[in-house]
Image (spheres, helix red, strand yellow):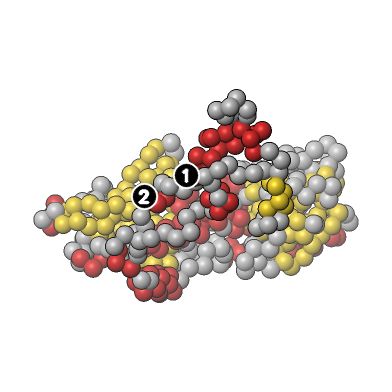
């Protein structure tokens, strides 16, 4: 699907966007890291009194939860900081640790395992506030919430091939996405014969899908477009899109007839590309204050649930349960299902004779053996379970 086109002179070209690295790298001690956020990056929550227990023990710092990464920076030594992109996180959980500096007081800590460039990093962010009230509170809840939102919003940031993004010829719209135009008759020049399909242009991405097979598609956020060009190829004028290294470094070619319509689409994409670069939408919407209120409401609701008390329940006599089916089992064991010889040599089935009509059941049945009643065989469960006084 992806194939380079022959480059020619006299090309129209769109300026490049700032490369997105914040969510895909782990970095240490970047000058003024916490003050220089990229465009579109927002701090969603601050967690104070946090120590980087493995890398900078003894330094109290602050944890910043953004829509792309976690940032920790020391409030004691300004040069110490670190950045953990969400795409590099392999595992994360919370645990209780004992701080040596505070008399081995139990404190809550956030553990993160990150993998970058085939290197494993382990981080342990510990609450060093010394407040016992924070020990049982979910102070790191925003980290888990935003990380889950990041995993569910990859279409805003990453190139996707052959995804379930089109249904019945219509693009599955993302939250906050607006479709500006749809262009039919677009040839994907990835093969010698080409594939005919359609473009969908929105405020977040450019989507192409084949008319014959909707699963043959590509979702390309403007964030992953390194450059846009109109170039000559062996198929005539073509729209050439170079994706960023984080988007695979592909070269995509598309032909649209007539050339006037191609130029109009090129100008539209250049404009949207520029606007998106000034204020990109990474798809994560999160309000830490609302999340805390929901957690508090859930805790209050859980506290109102009646507590389990032993005196509110009756203990059943299990000895009665062991007597279930006793008479029925005995009846069957004595020969209801088999032929059992009687004292005079005849079989048990011959002794009971022909079927008799049962008024209680309303149909004919075999004669019940002596010593048993219909009620004994009919009631499988005890009629009453008595409680132990």
Number of residue marks: 2
At x 33% / y 53%, what residue is drawn?
A: 94
Residue 262 in sight: no
Q: Which residue shows up at 71% across the image and 56% down it?
A: 362
Q: CA distance from mark 2 to mark 1?
A: 12 Å
Decide if residue 14 is on the left or right side of residue 305.
right
The residue drawn where x is 66% and y is 33% is: 350
Q: Nearer the viewer, residue 318 or 348?
A: 348
Which residue is nearer to you in this view: 165 or 203?
165
Which one is nearer the viewer's eye here, 386 or 217? 386
Check disc 2 and report the residue beneath it: 319
Q: Position of residue 93 (x, y in %)?
A: 36, 51
Q: Which one is closest to the eye, mark 2 or mark 1?
A: 1
Q: Quadrant of the N terminus?
A: top right
Tell me where residue 178 appears, x and y as whole percent.
69, 68
Q: Is residue 181 left or right of residue 56?
A: right
**Residue 187 x, y percent position in the rendering:** 83, 48
Pointer 2 or 1: first along the chain: 2
Residue at the spot 58% in from the left edge and 42% down from the top edge: 369
Secondary structure beneath dot 1 equals: helix
Q: Residue furthest front?
A: 344
Badge number at residue 62: none
Q: Is residue 350 above or below residue 50?
A: above
From the viewer's perspective, is 208 left or right of 118?
right
Which of the two residues, 43 or 19, is positioned nearer the viewer here? Answer: 43
Residue 324 x %, y %: 46, 48
Whether 360 is drawn above or below 245: the answer is below
Q: Which residue is mark 1?
A: 326
Is residue 291 visible in the rendered image? The answer is yes
């Amino acid at each position: 699907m992806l194939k380079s086109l022959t480059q020619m002179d006299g090309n129209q070209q769109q300026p490049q966007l700032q490369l997105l690295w914040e969510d895909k790298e782990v970095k240490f001690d970047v000058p003024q890291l916490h003050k220089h956020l990229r465009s579109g990056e927002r701090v969603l929550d601050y967690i104070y009194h946090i120590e980087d227990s493995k890398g900078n023990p003894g330094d109290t710092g602050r944890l910043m939860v953004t829509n792309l990464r976690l940032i920790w920076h020391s409030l004691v030594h300004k040069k110490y900081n670190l950045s953990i992109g969400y795409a590099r996180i392999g595992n994360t959980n919370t645990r209780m640790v004992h701080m040596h500096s505070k008399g081995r007081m139990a404190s809550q800590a956030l553990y993160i395992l990150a993998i970058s460039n085939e290197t494993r990093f382990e981080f342990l962010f510990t609450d060093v506030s010394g407040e016992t009230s924070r020990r049982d509170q979910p102070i790191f809840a925003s980290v888990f919430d935003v990380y889950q939102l990041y995993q569910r919003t990859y279409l805003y940031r990453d190139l996707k091939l052959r995804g379930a993004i089109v249904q019945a010829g219509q693009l599955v719209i993302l939250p906050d996405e607006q479709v500006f135009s749809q262009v039919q008759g677009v040839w994907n020049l990835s093969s010698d014969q080409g594939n005919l399909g359609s473009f969908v242009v929105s405020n977040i991405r450019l989507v192409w899908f084949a008319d014959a097979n909707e699963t043959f598609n590509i979702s390309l956020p403007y964030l992953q477009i390194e450059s846009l060009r109109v170039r000559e190829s062996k198929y005539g004028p073509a729209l050439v899109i170079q994706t960023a290294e984080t988007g695979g470094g592909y070269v995509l070619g598309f032909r649209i007839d007539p050339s006037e319509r191609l130029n109009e689409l090129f100008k539209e994409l250049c404009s949207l590309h520029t606007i998106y670069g000034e204020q990109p939408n990474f798809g994560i919407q999160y309000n830490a204050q609302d999340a805390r209120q929901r957690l508090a409401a859930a805790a209050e609701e859980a506290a109102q649930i009646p507590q389990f008390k032993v005196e509110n329940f009756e203990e059943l006599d299990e000895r009665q349960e062991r007597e279930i089916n006793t008479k029925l089992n005995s009846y069957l064991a004595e020969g209801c299902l088999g032929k059992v010889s009687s004292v005079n040599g005849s079989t048990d089935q011959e002794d009971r004779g022909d079927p008799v009509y049962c008024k209680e059941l309303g149909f004919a049945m075999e004669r019940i053996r002596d010593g048993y009643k219909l009620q004994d065989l009919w009631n499988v469960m005890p009629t009453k379970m008595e409680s132990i006084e």
